[in-house]
Amino acid sequence: MPNSHSGVFIVAEIGVNWNGDFGLVEQMMNIAKNAGCDAVKFQAFNEELIKEHPEKERLLKTSISQENVKKIDVISKRVGIEWFCTPMFPEAIEFLEPYVKRYKIRVFDGRPLFEIKWTELLEQVTKTGKEIIISCEKDPKQTKLYQNEKIRWLYCVPKYPCSLEDLDFSSIANFNGYSNHCPDIIAPLASVILGARIIEVHITLDKSKDFIDNSVSFEPNELFDIVEKIRKSERIIKK
């Protein structure tokens, strides 16, 4: 499959771990930048999607929205790192479009593709003409879009957290990369050695504090270690 990046494209998923605090998000962007990541990623959802979640109010503060998207963009430019987003409802595309170079689709929203179905969200993202990174559990060869030049496929086990035993890299060569929910750093490292060219890992400032996605996230020292090892591995992996 074609790849759009010369090296391994490493994404630090800030997601919901910034608590809606712009000082915190800038600190996390700087950590990702200094570690050697290529981009950071956020999520865009609305109240309807998380209405049953016990942390609904806190989660809403972390969603990229019409109100905060410009500020996120300003901070990313100041830090000097790309940011992009996982839209979870079609209307998010309109306010994200002026700012992002690519989009991410979560496992849940990508599942219709394996049933040869098309949703409004997928239609709107495709219409932008930008790169789309799709996380999926199944082999993407099962979809009609497998050879689409604009789509990158990430192997992902949507379990928070997942164990090494939950992972199966036997067909990872059919994917462009790997989206990690495993707390063991060997998972993203092994995926790179097996050919993954896009890596997505969640990050947190401190696992001892109350950040929502801590169970699947790496602290700064772990992130630095992961990126360093990936960059070293690139020296011995044939492109």
Image (spheres, grey):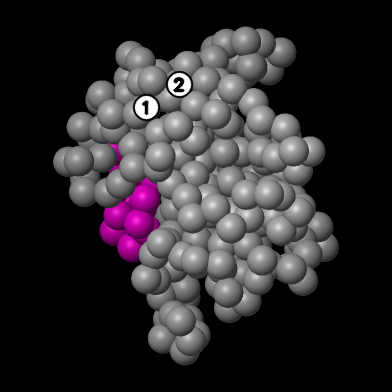
> Which residue matches tag 2?
92
Residue 86 horizontal side relative to residue 143, left or right: left
Kind of residue sitting beneath label 1:
Leu
Between 206 and 32, the one nearer to me in the picture:
32
Residue drawn at x 44%, y 53% as measured from the top left: 11
- Determine if residue 97 is in view: yes
Residue drawn at x 58%, y 46% as measured from the top left: 134
State whether residue 55 is above or below residue 202: above
Q: Residue 195 at x, y = what percent?
A: 58, 74
Residue 71 horizontal side relative to residue 122, left or right: left
Q: Say whether marks 1 and 2 touch (CB < 8 Å).
A: yes
State whether residue 47 is above or below residue 44: above
Between 85 and 140, the one nearer to me in the picture:
140
> Which residue matches tag 1?
96
Q: Residue 28 at x, y = what percent?
A: 36, 43
Q: Residue 95 at x, y = what percent?
A: 36, 20
| Quarter of the image with the N terminus in it | bottom right
Residue drawn at x 57%, y 31% as measured from the top left: 122
Q: Residues within 10 Å of mark 2 (few under 14, many from 20)?
A: many
Residue 192 horizontal side relative to residue 76, left or right: right
Identity of the residue furthest to the left in this view = 78
Q: Which residues are magenta?
A: 26-42
Q: How many marks can you see?
A: 2
Q: Residues within 10 Å of mark 1 (few under 14, many from 20)?
A: many
Residue 54 horizontal side relative to residue 33, left or right: right
Q: Secondary structure at mark 1?
A: helix
Measured Cα–Cα span from mark 1 to mark 2: 6 Å
Kind of residue sitting beneath label 2:
Ala
Residue 35, by quadrant, is bottom left
- Determine if residue 178 is in view: no
Q: Is residue 119 magenta?
A: no
Q: Residue 132 at x, y = what percent?
A: 49, 44
